[in-house]
């Protein structure tokens, strides 16, 4: 019983670690030196919401599937498509409205 109670917490902590990945990508991979204050706040909100959705999905789906690995893959795919990718695209990495105008 204790083991099954730890799984949602583990899913939450794993998804929360995504913040570190964001910072490494921003500064190391993309060498983006712009202010991170607003972006970091948005990333935190998206990551926490993703973690909560993943934990909730695992709690619901794992009951119905015998294989927890399949349950995790299904939950991760659904949460990514429905929430994580659209939120990252529209909130965290949204381009300013006049970004294209300055290039002209």
Image: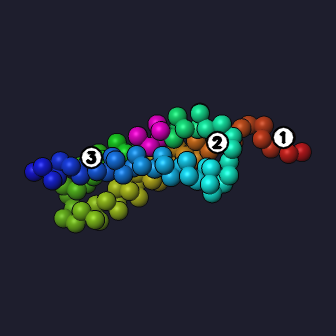
Image quarter (top left, top right, bottom left or bottom right) of the C terminus: top right
Q: Which of the 4 image quarters holds residue 47?
A: top left
Q: Is 47 a magenta residue?
A: yes
- Disc 3 target residue: 9
In this view, 71 is above or below 1: below
Residue 41 lies, in percent from the top left, at 52, 34
The color scheme shown is rainbow
In this rendering, position of residue 73 left or right of residue 88: left
Q: Are marks 3 and 1 in contact (CB under 8 Å)?
A: no
- Disc 1 target residue: 101
Residue 58 lies, in percent from the top left, at 27, 52
Label 1: which secondary element: helix
Q: Nearer the viewer, mark 3 or mark 1?
A: 3
Of mark 1 and mark 2, the one earlier in the sequence is 2
Around disc 2, counting alpha carbons within 10 Å, would you say few (fewer than 14), some (14 to 19), or many (20 or more)?
few
Residue, far right: 104
- The stretch of residues the image draws in magenta is 44-48
- Disc 2 target residue: 94
Separation (CA) of disc 2 from disc 3: 30 Å
Name which residue lies at 40% across and 40% down. 48
């Amino acid at each position: 019983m204790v083991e099954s109670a730890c799984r949602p917490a583990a899913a939450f902590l794993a998804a929360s670690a995504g913040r570190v990945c964001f910072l490494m990508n921003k500064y190391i991979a993309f060498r983006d030196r712009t202010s991170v204050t607003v972006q970091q706040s948005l990333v935190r909100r998206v990551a926490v919401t993703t973690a909560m959705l993943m934990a909730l999905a695992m709690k619901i789906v794992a009951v119905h599937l015998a294989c927890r690995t399949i349950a995790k893959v299904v939950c991760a795919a659904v949460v990514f498509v429905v929430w994580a990718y659209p939120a990252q695209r529209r909130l965290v990495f949204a381009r300013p409205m006049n970004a294209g105008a300055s290039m002209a």
